[in-house]
Amino acid sequence: AQSVAQPEDQVNVAEGNPLTVKCTYSVSGNPYLFWYVQYPNRGLQFLLKYITGDNLVKGSYGFEAEFNKSQTSFHLKKPSALVSDSALYFCAVAGRGADGLTFGKGTHLIIQP
Amino acid sequence: ETGVTQSPTHLIKTRGQQVTLRCSSQSGHNTVSWYQQALGQGPQFIFQYYREEENGRGNFPPRFSGLQFPNYSSELNVNALELDDSALYLCASSFWVGQSDTQYFGPGTRLTVL
């Protein structure tokens, strides 16, 4: 069975600084990896995904993620954080066939002015 | 915002009752998945519907059931509600059933079981 680990419950970053939210995964077969963001009392909003190809994936709102097969990681990054980036971020991996997405527990990102 | 809508927004039920949650897929999407998100946790996959048939299921008991209609809208039914069923229920639609396809989520239904 597939799994996702987000080792940090919370990440604090000063506005304007680069940010990284970590994610590692375990899956048999090709990994299909996703990042979603959730604002309070809202559903999940898609940011980006890795299917194949370039290890650096660019997504919405200036976010990007780096896929590293040898380290089984898919870290979310942004060169310059905004206060409005403060939210709950989820990494997910697609299961086999119709097994749905398996999510990590989420990381609270707090951007301090 | 995605084109996925869910109703109702909030719901309060008592233990033992039954509940039906509704989801309208984004236009052009023929696959719908349901997730349960308990407080402080990531979403957990309940099941997926494609062409009106359940074609994938997570680790949830049979009292969780669903339907998909010809217009690709969907329902989640939960019988014999338990306190632990209190959660945010998320519906997601995708263009097709493949693993790599992006799932777009609705705003969710917050269910409280007393």
Image (tube, helix red, strand yellow):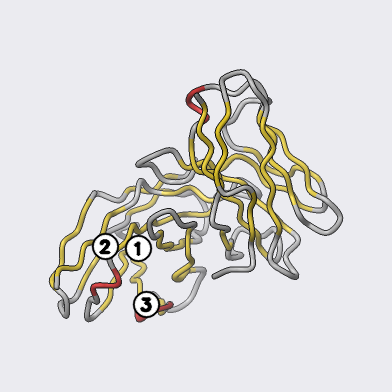
Residue under circle 1? A74
Type of amino acid under label 1 = Phe
Q: Residues within 10 Å of mark 1 (few under 14, many from 20)?
A: many
Find residue B81 and report its horizontal and vertical position in percent: 59, 23
Which mark lies nearer to you, 1 or 2?
2
**Residue A21: numbered disc:** 2
- Choose between A48 and A1: the one closer to the eye: A48
Q: Position of residue A38 (x, y in %)?
A: 41, 59
The amino acid beneath tag 3 is: Leu
The numbered mark, 1 or 3, whose residue comes first in the sequence reads 3
Mark 1 belongs to which subunit?
A
Residue depicted at 27% across the width and 76% down the height = A78
Residue B66 appears left or right of B85 = right
Image side of residue A104 versus residue B14, left or right:
left
Residue picked out by circle 3 = A56
**Which chain does the numbered disc 3 sit on?**
A
Q: Going from the N terminus, do you reach mark 1 or mark 2 first?
A: 2
Q: Are marks 1 and 2 in contact (CB under 8 Å)?
A: no
Q: Quadrant of the N terminus of chain B?
A: bottom right
Q: Cα distance, mark 2 to mark 3?
A: 15 Å
Q: Residue at x 48, y 26 (%)?
A: B84
* Depth order, front residue of B109/A111: B109
Read off the chain for label 2: A
Badge 1 vs badge 3, beta-carbon distance below 8 Å: no
Instruction: Give the SS element for disc 1.
Output: strand
